[in-house]
Amino acid sequence: MARFGRRKNDDDEAKKKITKASLKKSLRLFKYVKPYAGTFAVGLVFLFLSSAASMVFPYLTGQLVDAANTDFLDQINRIALLLLGVFFLNAVFSFFRIYLFAIVTQKTLASLRQATYYQLIRLKMKFFSERRVGELNSRISSDISLLQETLTTTIAEFLRQIIIIVIGIALLTYISGKLTLLMLALVPVVVLVAVLFGKKIRKLSKEAQDAVADSNVIVEETLQGIATVKAFVNERFEYLRYKKRTDDVIGVSLKGAKWRGAFASFIIFCLFGSIVAVIWYGVVLVQEDQLSIGDLFTFILYSVFVGASLGGIADLYSQLQKAIGATENLLEIFDEDKEEEQEKQFSKKITEGKISFKAVDFAYPSRSDVEVLKNLSFEIESGQQVALVGPSGAGKSTITSLILKFFEVSKGEILIDKLKINEYALADLRSAMAIVPQDVVLFGGSIYDNILYGNPDASKKEVKEAARKANAVEFIEAFPDGYDTLVGERGVQLSGGQRQRIAIARAILKNPKILILDEATSSLDSKSEQLVQQALDELMKGRTSLVIAHRLSTIQKADNILVLQEGRLVESGNHQELLAKEDGLYRDLKTLQMGV
């Protein structure tokens, strides 16, 4: 059962390493920071000032210790006041540092979310056919949230720790070169262990991210199909499925926590071990009059600052690794081909709506070895009502997807108004078409908003006129809130017939040249079907209409009926002509539906 399988990508591990190439790739996202570069630069200034102010504290504390050996109370008071002044300035610098980075982060993330969403909805249908909604939702939510932490805290802290380490080591060297050499002798060992731990932590972090993404997919799928779940009494099954995934998250996360804990323990041991060694050797130097007590105290404080920064960098480095992984996940979306990249810059408009298929072969990209359409040719004249019929899997819905240019044909060509479909700009092509599907998807707003979706520039009068033509006014005005009635997620507050009529009103408002009806009445009761069919008859007037239907009774008035079987056109003609063929597929289908 592929639906329940866990998504794996063996190449992901290599992708998430922090390398020169991955850093260069990730820096592409910083174009979203560029508009706020001035604010970011000021934030960096305050970052440097707060770090520098922190480094003044050990120096003044050492001076205060040395002042204890003198009789100058004024000097002691002056140093104490200077320390308070430094703390105050550090507090001010830190406030502006945090606030300015927050401004940059929130504006950058808003731009990034908008760009990611805009990129996502412009990708080819091939992309969506190969991915699940939960996975894509995770890209916009989880990965960008991870970048929020990185931009707000991690980068600033990483830079701050680097500044503290550089300034700290310089000051330590100035105070005592001998003590500094002793302290730095332990650094290569710490760095080597950090690299080894980092590799393991990075791998476990990636596994935890994948496990969380998989659990999110289950939630998304279950909630989208909640009616099916309840109808099959599979609440416990779905719960156990989710429980297994979340338990996987616990296992991987705790394993990662063990490694991070072991790493932190090692760092702490090295840190305090270094401090003990420094104090021991410092006391020796004090005894030899090579160092004052105040300088030793200052050196110890600087050592603590540098050691803490070295220990903190390991965790920050791990956070950056996860951010690199999230960045690459996002960039995978940005690297996908957009539909617009295939557009030709023509300004041609569809004026008649004549459709021609010429020797078209097609296989879906995800199943390239299975041909859905085979050498298919037919013509639909402007204003004609043409029906597509045939067994399931014959290729009926595929034809509509190709006309809408959701996919490219494998062979042959499609013409509209005697021009190849690729000669139209995609927006111009689809603007001339409207579709009323079997499973109508309404957006979670009002009835008015859902009708207006067909033409966002339409007036209120035009919306109401479209509703009238769609036989929708009666039930709309029966609601207490009328056109402002909320339809619920995917339109769950409305019946199937009501949703269909809203979809028809939406199509009427769009006023298309080409109309596609994909089994628009197949799931309705007799009364709803009658109302919807009346609305469809109104909608089809004067338009090229392509009707997919299982109920053959709904297409008897069609100008032409194309009968498909296994991707081939096997019969064509009007209702009476096709019924006259004794061994014809259409006649067989009609007989089966009549129960004869």
Image (cartoon, rainbow, N blue to C red):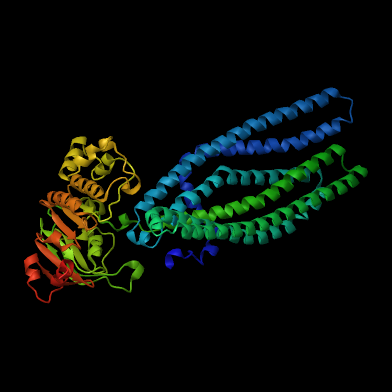
The percent position of residue 401, horizontal first and vertical second, equals 26, 60
Residue at 87% x, 30% y is: 68
Q: Nearer the viewer, residue 553 or 185?
A: 553
Asked if residue 574 can be seen in this view, the reply is no
- Name the side, left or right, on which 9 lies relative to 63: left
351 or 172: nearer the viewer: 351
Marker count (numbered): 0
- Could you tell whether 39 is left or right of 458 in the image? right
Identify the residue at image location x=75%, y=25%. 81
> What residue lies at 40% left-to-right and 47% top-to-bottom?
115
**Residue 283 at x, y percent in the picture:** 89, 45
In the picture, measured across the screen, residue 301 lies left or right of residue 283, that is: left
| Quadrant placement of the N terminus | bottom left
Please provide percent x and percent y for residue 301. Answer: 78, 41
Q: Is residue 186 above or below residue 301?
A: below
Q: Residue at x 31, y 47 (%)?
A: 491
Quarter of the image holding residue 127?
A: bottom left
